[in-house]
Amino acid sequence: WSDEQKLQYISIHLQDDAQRWWTQASNVIKTWSSFTEAVTHAFGSTKAQQLAFEQLKWYKQTINQSITQYYDTIMELCKKV
């Protein structure tokens, strides 16, 4: 399939949040590479989300870590999940 064909038929395979996202994004996204980059940015990588979730689940404040540093780290992990 050409990149153009992939973009034409992608909407058939998307559902729910992804379909709503594509309805808005399809006006701007014109290449397959920009689609893959945008969809990964919008929905993240499953592997990366799983890793962040595991880190979040077991993360503990260290002795030399301020509460602000701890909070910032937790918030960054939450964004990845």
Image: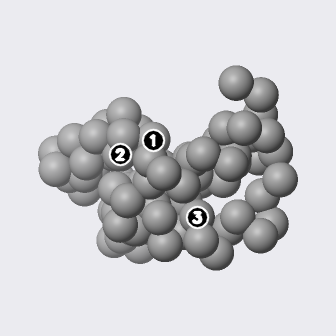
Q: Within 10 angstroms of label 1, few (less than 14), some, or many (20 or more) residues?
A: some
Hey, which quadrant is residue 4 in on the image? top right
Q: Nearer the viewer, residue 55 or 51?
A: 51
Q: Amino acid at mark 3?
A: Trp
Number of numbered discs overlaid on the protein picture: 3
Q: Sequence order check: which comes first, mark 3 or mark 1?
A: 3
Hey, which quadrant is residue 27 in on the image? bottom right
Q: Is residue 59 visible?
A: no
* Element class at badge 1: loop
Q: Which tag is nearer the camera, tag 1 or tag 2?
A: 1
* Element class at badge 3: helix
User: Badge 2 is on which residue?
Assistant: 49
Q: Sequence order check: which comes first, mark 2 or mark 3?
A: 3
Hey, which quadrant is residue 23 in on the image? bottom right
Q: Which tag is nearer the camera, tag 2 or tag 3?
A: 3
User: Badge 1 is on which residue?
Assistant: 45
Q: Nearer the viewer, residue 26 or 81?
A: 26
Q: Within 10 angstroms of label 2, few (less than 14), some, or many (20 or more) residues?
A: some
CB atoms at circles 1 and 2 under 8 Å apart? yes
Q: Which mark is residue 22?
A: 3
Q: What is the residue that sits farthest to the top in this orientation?
A: 1
Residue 72 x, y percent position in the rendering: 44, 67
Q: Which tag is nearer the camera, tag 3 or tag 1?
A: 3
Q: Name which residue lies at 70% across and 24% down.
A: 1
Please say if 20 is above or below 73.
Answer: below
Can you say which quadrant of the picture contains the C terminus? bottom left
CA separation, marks 1 and 2?
6 Å
Q: Amino acid at mark 1?
A: Ser
CA separation, marks 3 and 1?
17 Å
CB atoms at circles 2 and 3 under 8 Å apart? no
